[in-house]
Image (cartoon, grey):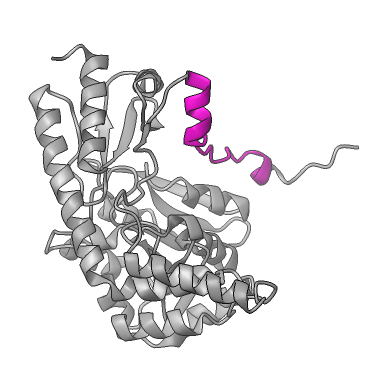
Amino acid sequence: MTIKPPDYISNIKPYVPGKPIEELERELGIRNSVKLASNENPVGPSPMALQAIIDSLTYLVSTNSLNRYPDGSGYYIKKALSEKLSVREEEIILGNGSNELIDLVIRTFIQLGDEAVMAHPSFIVYPMSVQATGGKPIQIPLRNYTHDLDAMAKGVTQNTKMLFVANPNNPTGTINKREEFDRLMNRIPDGVLVVVDEAYYEYITDAEYADSIKHFRAGRDILILRTFSKIYGLAGIRIGYGIAREDIIVEINKLRPPFNTNSLAQIAAVYALKDESHVKYSREINEQGKRYLYKELDSFGMNYVPTEANFIYLPLGENSNVLYNELLRHGVIVRPVGPQEIRVTIGLPEENKRFIEALKKVKGKK
């Protein structure tokens, strides 16, 4: 007899990762490709974080300590986050990237038949993880490529246990501002956990960006997720964190694996937080790239959505996989995020130029 999972598991459409860049180059017979598909920081990690990784690994090897588990409490990184954000260490939870925390909070608070309200399109992991618990994702269409918070509030019922806000939204790069977010929070009843995914928080330049921390300090049912994978450039070693009331953190910790963040990630994150100049430089590079790409896309009438993140969403009006494959043959890797939409990471100046040159060739522009 074939072993089968429940229908709510077997019906999940799995996340399809991109192939390694080396494999794509081998298959297509191309070289020196640029990857603009995963919203990574093209600058890379802070030099301080890199040196901390080298020093820590050297110490672990020289003392024959790699057989020891990492610090399960995350003492030093929690202490650093506590000081930087003015929150108590008991109000912080660490994750193997913020992605793990999304899964953990859903498994903690959503049971079979419970509902979770979210936008569509948004981060694909939300509906997948909700469905994996037997919950029901309630997906509210975007309005002008942005979370329609009023419509999402109306989507809350007596069965709703959670509401997700990706701010900025992935894949569109848009944000919800302070006034509309405050209005949302005023309409959400107690007992509904608002999960605010701020993976791209450090890239924000808009002064009207929503203040989620204010609602946390007011004692609301809110979990704020952030990560070291984006502007801090530590995606390869996986570490993120969440901020919430202590009683919420206590419950999520019951499902958190004991050693879910590794030793090198923890020490790298501590030093990444210290290097504010690297964050500033990464943001400046992103803003420069954004201005360049806007100008070039405008020059040949290409549609795009203005972004507050480190990527740009392009509604094509044509098959996204066709454009993806044509760009790939020119050594530029982007991400199809819908049948007629692609998302392109803002890269280094030379990478952005490669993308524009390839796009012009594909589109027959000169």
Comparing 360 with 130, the one in front is: 360
As drawn, the residue found furthest toward the right would be 1
> How many dots with numbers?
0
User: Residue at (33%, 53%) from the top-left corner?
Assistant: 152
Which image quadrant for residue 251? bottom right
In the rendered image, the quadrant that contains the C terminus is top left
Q: Is residue 246 above or below residue 236?
A: below
User: Residue at (39%, 88%) from the top-left corner?
Assistant: 88
Which image quadrant for residue 83? bottom left
Q: Is residue 170 above or below residue 106?
A: above
Residue 17 located within the stretch drawn in magenta: yes
Comparing 240 with 350, the one in front is: 350
Judge left or right: residue 19 versus residue 361: right
Comparing 303 with 185, the one in front is: 303
The image position of residue 11, as x and y in percent, is 63, 38
Which image quadrant for residue 353? top left
As drawn, the residue found furthest toward the front would be 62
Q: Which residues are the magenta region?
A: 8-28
Residue 324 located within the stretch drawn in magenta: no
User: Residue at (43%, 59%) from the top-left corner?
Assistant: 157
Residue 218 visible in the displayed image: no
Judge left or right: residue 135 versus residue 293: right
User: Residue at (62%, 56%) from the top-left corner?
Assistant: 133
